[in-house]
Image: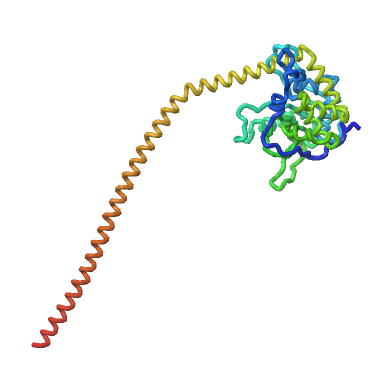
């Protein structure tokens, strides 16, 4: 039975993974020599790669796949998604930069709008230590831009359509173990929503490997799509993908498009060009980091030595102060002892004075 337009079963859980294992890492580990063509690329291109992902969801023959993905993410029936302001995949195999976001309107001209993107690799500067803040803030920026760019002339604020920013991510942004999909809206500290005008949705593709262990009949719609986008180019999971294709027409359409792209020499050349551009970019960043280290490490080493010298001097002064404090304490103890001795002498003198006074009185009385 096809369930492309059936509501998604809530927030599906994949299963705890010991580490943040990306689909790209899985593919690298699982590929065998026979899975690589003479051009050095996988026989089946990975559907999570930005350009491949965009082609799968924007080519005219893949409209059913796009509708199915949007329905699965939004958790409601969807009949059509009309693409707009969308840059189609570049046809120049030497193109370096392309626009990969997929912008569309759901169910008619006045329907809700959505922006779909694939985050295939970590954004520069993003890591667990800074809570992957860059990809989150970019999602907020994209969502704000999407919602605020609606035609404003003669329209009441309450008549603006809903806007959705949908990010499929190849790494675990939030650090959650079981949640495949996370949805965020404007809410106060008590969890009460301000409105449902905007929503940012993240799908964590690192959960796909655990989800793939489930029987296909037990997978929700969004779980099926997560498995396809994460593992659709991984031969190890071809049986699971075949099972999902039999159940979901949208996935079958997407897989057919993926195979067509993978067999097309021009598409493979564009894939290689994009991958080379990313490798060149990483190379340039590595060289830049190396040059910065070469320039600043001697200065930092000098500053570290200066700091160490100052720390040693401070330690020496602290030791000297401690010695003086000990000497002062000893002198204070000696002074206290002398004061006590003087006090004892004073008591003795007072006693002798009293005794003399008593004797003088007796002598006076005897006379």
Q: Position of residue 138 (x, y in %)?
A: 67, 30
Say whether residue 40 is visible: yes
Rendered position, 32 above or below 93: below
Residue positioned 23% across, 65% down in the render: 341
Q: Position of residue 329 (x, y in %)?
A: 30, 54
Rendered position, 2 above or below 188: above
* Furthest residue in direction right, as rendered: 1
* Residue 255 as seen in the image, left or right of residue 92: right
Quarter containing the N terminus? top right
* Residue 307 as seen in the image, left or right of residue 57: left
**Residue 95 or residue 305, whichever sits in front:** 305
Say whether residue 202 is visible: no
Q: Position of residue 33 (x, y in %)?
A: 72, 18
Residue positioned 69% across, 29% down in the render: 22
* Residue 340 as seen in the image, left or right of residue 270: left
* Furthest residue in direction bottom, as rendered: 366
Q: Position of residue 212 (x, y in %)?
A: 78, 33
Task: Determine which quarter of the picture holds residue 307.
Answer: top left
**Residue 70 or residue 127, whichever sits in front:** 127
Residue positioned 78% across, 34% down in the render: 213
**Residue 330 or residue 38, whichever sits in front:** 38
């Amino acid at each position: 039975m096809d369930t492309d337009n059936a509501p998604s079963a809530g927030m599906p859980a994949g299963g705890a993974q010991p580490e943040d294992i990306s689909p790209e890492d899985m593919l690298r580990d699982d590929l065998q020599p026979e899975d690589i063509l003479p051009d050095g690329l996988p026989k089946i291109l990975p559907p999570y790669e930005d350009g491949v992902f965009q082609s799968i969801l924007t080519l005219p023959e893949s409209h059913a796949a796009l509708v199915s993905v949007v329905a699965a993410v939004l958790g409601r029936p969807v009949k059509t998604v009309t693409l707009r302001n969308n840059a189609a995949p570049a046809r120049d195999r030497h193109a370096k930069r392309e626009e990969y976001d997929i912008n569309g309107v759901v169910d008619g001209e006045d329907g809700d709008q959505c922006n779909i993107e694939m985050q295939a690799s970590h954004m520069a500067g993003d890591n667990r230590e800074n809570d992957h803040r860059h990809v989150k803030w970019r999602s907020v920026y994209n969502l704000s831009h999407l919602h605020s760019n609606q035609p404003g002339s003669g329209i009441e604020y309450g008549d603006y359509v809903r806007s959705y920013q949908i990010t499929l991510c190849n790494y675990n942004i939030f650090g959650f173990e079981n949640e495949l999909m996370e949805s965020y809206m404007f809410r106060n500290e008590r969890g009460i929503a301000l409105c449902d005008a905007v929503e940012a949705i993240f799908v964590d593709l690192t959960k796909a490997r655990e989800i793939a262990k489930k029987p296909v009949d037990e997978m929700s719609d969004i779980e099926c799509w997560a498995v396809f986008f994460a593992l659709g180019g991984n031969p190890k999971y071809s049986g699971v993908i075949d099972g999902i294709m039999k159940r979901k027409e949208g996935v079958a359409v997407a897989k057919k498009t993926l195979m067509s792209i993978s067999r097309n020499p021009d598409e493979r050349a564009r894939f290689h060009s994009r991958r080379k551009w990313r490798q060149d970019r990483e190379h340039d960043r590595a060289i830049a980091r190396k040059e910065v280290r070469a320039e600043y490490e001697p200065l930092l080493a000098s500053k570290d030595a200066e700091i160490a010298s100052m720390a040693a001097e401070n330690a020496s002064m602290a030791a000297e102060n401690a010695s003086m404090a000990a000497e002062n304490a000893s002198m204070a103890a000696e002074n206290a002892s002398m004061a006590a001795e003087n006090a004892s002498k004073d008591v003795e003198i007072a006693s002798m004075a009293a005794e003399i006074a008593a004797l003088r009185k007796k002598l006076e009385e005897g006379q």
